[in-house]
């Protein structure tokens, strides 16, 4: 199975800060990488697909980049509603796998 | 609007069986692959299984392979997960998810399965 490793596991930032989350795959996955937002008590939501494509309705402050084994999710200006855990997920293999998650807290 | 409603989650003893259901609406069900994803208490998301639009192809995570069976009834717009030989580590919130390619595009609210003696 393809292992996905996220860092950091948690972070705390202020409203308006630029936030960066990284995800590393155990083998090359081209751009078959998605990002999800999971707010407390809510269902997860797809944010980014194919490493850098913004899903419909997702604010433009979210962006993704990377290819191969290393990927990044960036929130350009953190908002209070961005309090959530963020997960990367590879779709290169039919056996999907998620990263361990990054919990984003607001200072 | 896509609507996915899971049901069937209960408290069950280890070794027993359980079937989860997911009622889908708001889209053409038989156009899409469907997934089950779970989240154990205090843990991250774990993909469980996927089924193709026609039910002809299925895949499972190593942790459930041989114990769980995914199926669908396109005439009823319904997805199922038959869970056998349940273990305490299967305790989780189980999400029904509509797939677009292998993107997990729309999620239900989940149904809670607790495996405990």
Image: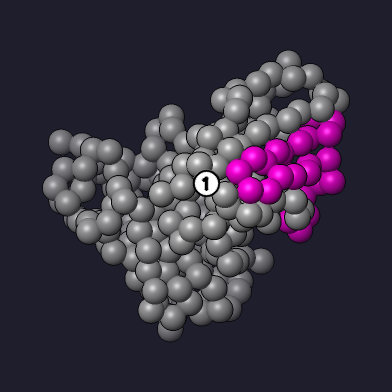
Q: Residues within 10 Å of mark 1 (few under 14, many from 20)?
A: some
Residue at position x 17%, y 51% from top?
Answer: B85
Q: Is residue A87 visible?
A: no
The span picked out in magenta is: A55-81
Q: Quadrant of residue A11?
A: top right
Residue at position x 61%, y 43% from top?
Answer: A69
In screen coordinates, is B17 left or right of A31? left
Task: Say above or below: B89 vs B68.
Answer: above
Tell me where residue B108 appears, x and y as whole percent.
Answer: 52, 55
Task: Say above or below: A80 vs A52.
Answer: above
Task: Say above or below: A10 vs A84.
Answer: above
Residue at position x 55%, y 62% from top?
Answer: B102
In the foreground, A37 or A65: A65
Residue, disc 1:
A27
How does the figure colour the protein chain or chains? Answer: one colour
**Chain assignment, label 1:** A
Tell me where residue B87 appears, x and y as whole percent.
Answer: 21, 43
Residue at position x 60%, y 74% from top?
Answer: B27
Q: Is residue A77 magenta?
A: yes
């Amino acid at each position: 199975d393809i292992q996905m490793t996220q860092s950091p596991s948690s972070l705390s930032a202020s409203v308006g800060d630029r936030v960066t989350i990284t995800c590393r795959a155990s083998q090359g996955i081209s751009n078959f990488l998605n990002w999800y937002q999971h707010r407390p008590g809510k269902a997860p939501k797809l944010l980014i697909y194919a490493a850098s494509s913004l899903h419909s309705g997702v604010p433009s402050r979210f962006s993704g980049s990377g290819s191969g084994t290393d990927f990044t999710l960036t929130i350009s200006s953190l908002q209070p509603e961005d309090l959530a855990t963020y997960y990367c997920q590879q779709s290169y293999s039919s056996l999907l796998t998620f990263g361990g998650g990054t919990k984003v807290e607001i200072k | 609007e896509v609507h996915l409603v899971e049901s069937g989650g209960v408290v069950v003893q280890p070794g027993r069986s359980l079937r989860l259901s997911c009622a889908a609406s708001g889209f053409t069900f038989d156009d899409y692959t469907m997934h089950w994803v779970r989240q154990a208490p205090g843990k991250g998301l774990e993909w469980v299984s996927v089924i193709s639009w026609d039910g002809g192809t299925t895949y499972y995570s190593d942790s459930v392979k041989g114990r769980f069976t995914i199926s669908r009834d396109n005439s009823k717009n319904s997805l199922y997960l038959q869970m056998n030989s349940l273990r305490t580590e299967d305790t989780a919130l189980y999400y029904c998810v509509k797939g677009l390619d292998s993107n997990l595009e729309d999620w239900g609210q989940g149904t809670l399965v607790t495996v405990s003696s």
